[in-house]
Image: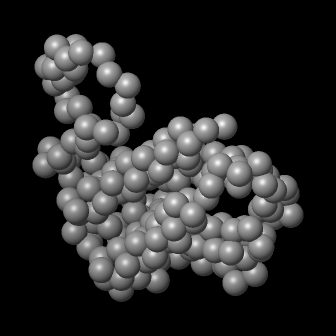
Amino acid sequence: MDNSYLNSVKKQIRYYKSLGDKTFDQLTQEQLFHQVNEESNSIAIVTKHIAGNMLSRWTNFFIEDGEKDWRNRDEEFINTFHSKEEMLAYWEKGWSVFLNTIESLKNEDLERIIYIRNQGHTVVEAINRQICHYPYHIGQIVFLGKILKNESWKSLSIPKNASKAYNDNKFSKEKTRTHFTDDL
């Protein structure tokens, strides 16, 4: 496997992080901590879970199981943040560990075996597992943000009723080989 896999992963994870960041930018602390009902998770809780998972999975990636003894997954679903800034700092801490680990990988690492809850994964499988897991939750964050902002929501992709103009612009250009995130 050549560098295209790792390069694509790096671009995609930064794209999904940006969706979370752009959602947080639009919301107040009250909106971030809002729970629709007792069984639902606030954006802050989902953020805490994503960052907690990243810290556990990507710390000492090659030498320790991805489910660390110090991780308390159940605690991730209880909001303990006191401010938007505290939540954002934890979000950044998780992403820092994840991104630093991904940036350190080389092609020869991709077939190495790592463990998550004692189950062996190739590095590719571990990456794929997490780049499915994190966007799932980031989608929840974006969806909740859109509900909370309602008509004042600023679209993070092609806005409603703008697909034709977007496509017209894309098809007015020469074909190129780029990653879909290159012009975002």
* Image quadrant where residue 113 sits: bottom right
Q: Which colour assignment does the render follow?
A: one colour
Depth check, front residue: 123 or 4: 4
Of residue 71 and residue 66, the one placed in the foreground of this image is 66
Q: Position of residue 15 (x, y in %)?
A: 38, 48
Name the residue at 77% across, 48% down: 111
In the rendered structure, the answer to whether residue 88 lies left or right of residue 80 reads left
| Closer to the camera in the image, 128 or 70 | 128
Quadrant where the N terminus lies? top right
Residue positioned 33% across, 54% down in the render: 18
Q: Is residue 162 left or right of residue 18?
A: left
Q: 43 or 69: nearer the eye?
A: 69
The picture places residue 184, in percent across and down from the top left corner, at 26, 41
Residue 48 at x, y = what percent?
49, 71
Residue 63 left/right relative to 169: right
Q: How many marks?
A: 0
The answer to whether residue 172 is seen in the rendering is yes
Q: Is residue 119 left or right of residue 89?
A: right
x, y percent for residue 39: 53, 61
* Vertical position of residue 21 compared to residue 56: above or below: above
Q: Quadrant of residue 55?
A: bottom right
Q: Which residue appears at 46% of the width and 83% of the height?
A: 80
Decide: is 88 above or below 1: below
| Res 98 seen here | no
Residue pictured at 71% horizontal, 51% vertical:
108
